[in-house]
Amino acid sequence: MSKRDYYEVLGLQRSATAEEIKKAYRRLAKQHHPDFNKDDKEAEKRFKEIKEAYDVLSDPQKRQQYDQFGHQSDFNGGAGGFGGFGGQGFGGFGFGGIDDIFEQFFGGMGGRRRPPGPEQGNHLRYDLEITLEEAFKGKSKVITIPRTETCSECNGTRAKAGTRPETCSACGGSGQQQQTRSTPFGRFVSMHPCVACRGEGKVIKDPCPSCSGQGRVVKEKKIDVKIPAGIEDGAKLRIAGEGEAGLRGGPPGDLYVVVRVKPHKIFRRQGPDLMKEVPISISQAALGVEMEVETLDGNAKLRVPEGTQHGTTFRLKGHGMPYLRGSGRGDLRVTVKINVPKRLNPRQKELLAELARVSGEEAGLDHKGIIDRVKDAFSGA
Ligand SMILES: [Zn+2]
Ligand SMILES: [Zn+2]
């Protein structure tokens, strides 16, 4: 099933502001929350879809990756659920009630609600293009990636060096405040997120200047990527821990290098085998020939036997790509293409005509016929 576009799910333009995204989510989440739509079996699905869209679009980094790469369904699951959308993927979402929606915005609600815990950093993807020769030999390549790292000044605490986040005095660190309302139906006590600390339970009086109180900074990092010999187009190399920094002490994400092998001018590839075409002449096909053919590492001998037909494929064992696992190599499959000469000099024409004549064939398009002319020459006319 193809996924709906996140902007479409929230009914937004791609240019929507963070505020618009938040508003649309609040409105839709309330409207479709399963607690309010108990008889509607589709509600849970719609709600999940809305939440997923919001999770991605409300995070500037995830949104940017989504804008760039789309759903990346290709990367979900498989190698650890990649897609740049956080390590935990999208699954495992339960319904604790309407408060869940607010938890989204304000973090923990205190009491039975947990404050936000450590979160793994985003995975990163890097597309690396290499040549077939590089895939053949293997390669070590240094790539430079911009990524967020834990701020070294504040160690991710977000507070200026020498200070630390203080417990919020307005809510006593619980992150929530109580509100009592009287209505015609009775008195309601509701909890809402603390305004002073935005539900975090802590306030930072002096934000760290080097990360502007974010706890993370964007840095360029050089990483040496080892590409094993025999790697295939589209292969993903996982480099553990080289993704973005985690949040609140969470582990970093992973880096995935997606290897693209450029098409080659001469060789095509099928698994461990290489394929190429080699032109031979009519005479070589008929009489046989031993010739040198180019491989990815030097030349190899190809023996074309007498009477070889156009399109015949010969297998040169061990002249293909190295196996990614284990030792040894695939084969080189050479297909011969018989080249029919387009321009012949008189002597060549004469010899072919002679060949046709002794074979009892008719050949030639001159009004008299080349065979007749050759005959004339022989009879001395
Ligand atoms: Zn900092
Ligand atoms: Zn507070």
Image (cartoon, rainbow, N blue to C red):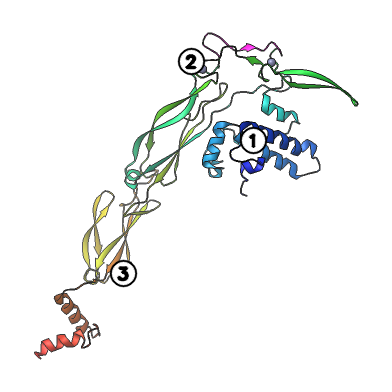
Q: Secondary structure at mark 2?
A: loop
Q: Quadrant of ligand 2?
A: top right
Q: Is residue 95 above or below residue 279?
A: above
The residue singled out by tag 1 in the image is 54
Task: Find the magenta span and give its range.
Answer: 159-171
SS of the residue at dot 3? loop
- For marks 2 and 1 on the same chain, the one whose residue lies earlier in the sequence: 1
State the residue at coordinates (64%, 31%). Answer: 19
Look at mark 3 in the image and give the residue it sits on: 310
Which x, y percent locates residue 332? Answer: 32, 55
User: Residue beneath label 2, please?
Assistant: 153
- Residue nearest the viewer, comparing 373 with 292: 373
Residue 84 in view:
no
Characterize the magenta stretch by its predominant secondary structure: loop
In the picture, measured across the screen, residue 331 lies left or right of residue 4, that is: left
Mark 1: which amino acid? Answer: Tyr
Question: For this rendering, which residue is in front, 78 or 108?
Answer: 108
Dot 1 or dot 3: first in sequence order is 1
